[in-house]
Amino acid sequence: MAVRAVRGAIQVDEDDRQQVLDATTELISAVLERNGLTQEDLISVVFTATPDLTSEFPAYAARQLGFVDVPLMCATEISVAGAMPRVVRLLAHVETDLPRSGITHAYLRGAAALRRDLPS
């Protein structure tokens, strides 16, 4: 079994606690589903949010999904002029038999524009 990294991002409409939680839940679910992963496959997850999202920690959505024994961390993205606003990103480290080329990253809603090279 190999350790792989899976990326994802989602844009929310506004800095609203429930929107951040719902969007993060959607993102986590998409990453797991697209890669045939379960919570047991997760080693750790790093979440980032753009500086304009301050209403809730994205990791709290993972805790609500039952990720109680998975190390989680939140951080703020660097503020870059012209960067897409209101984006939650994740970087999950997982154990999987998938080759690196078999990993499917998830860029959802407006964040799909961040990776036009990937299928939606």
Image (spheres, rainbow, N blue to C red):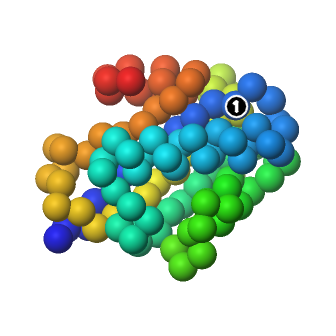
Q: Where on the picture, by quarter, is residue 34?
A: top left
Q: Is residue 59 visible?
A: no
- Which residue corresponds to mark 1? 12
What residue is rendered at 76% in x and 37% in y? 19
What residue is rendered at 59% in x and 55% in y? 47
**Above or below: residue 64 compared with residue 101:** below
Where is residue 13 shown, x and y percent of the image? 75, 26
Frontmost residue, 92 versus 38: 38
The quadrant of the rendering that contains the C terminus is top left
Frontmost residue, 94 versus 85: 94
What residue is rendered at 50% in x and 63% in y? 45
Where is residue 98 shown, x and y percent of the image? 18, 54
> Is 110 on the left or on the right of 41, as rendered?
right
> Is 47 on the left or on the right of 104, as rendered?
right
> Is 44 on the left or on the right of 88, as rendered?
left
What residue is rendered at 70% in x and 31% in y? 12
Where is residue 29 shown, x and y percent of the image? 49, 47
Where is residue 10 shown, x and y percent of the image? 58, 35
The quadrant of the rendering that contains the N terminus is bottom left
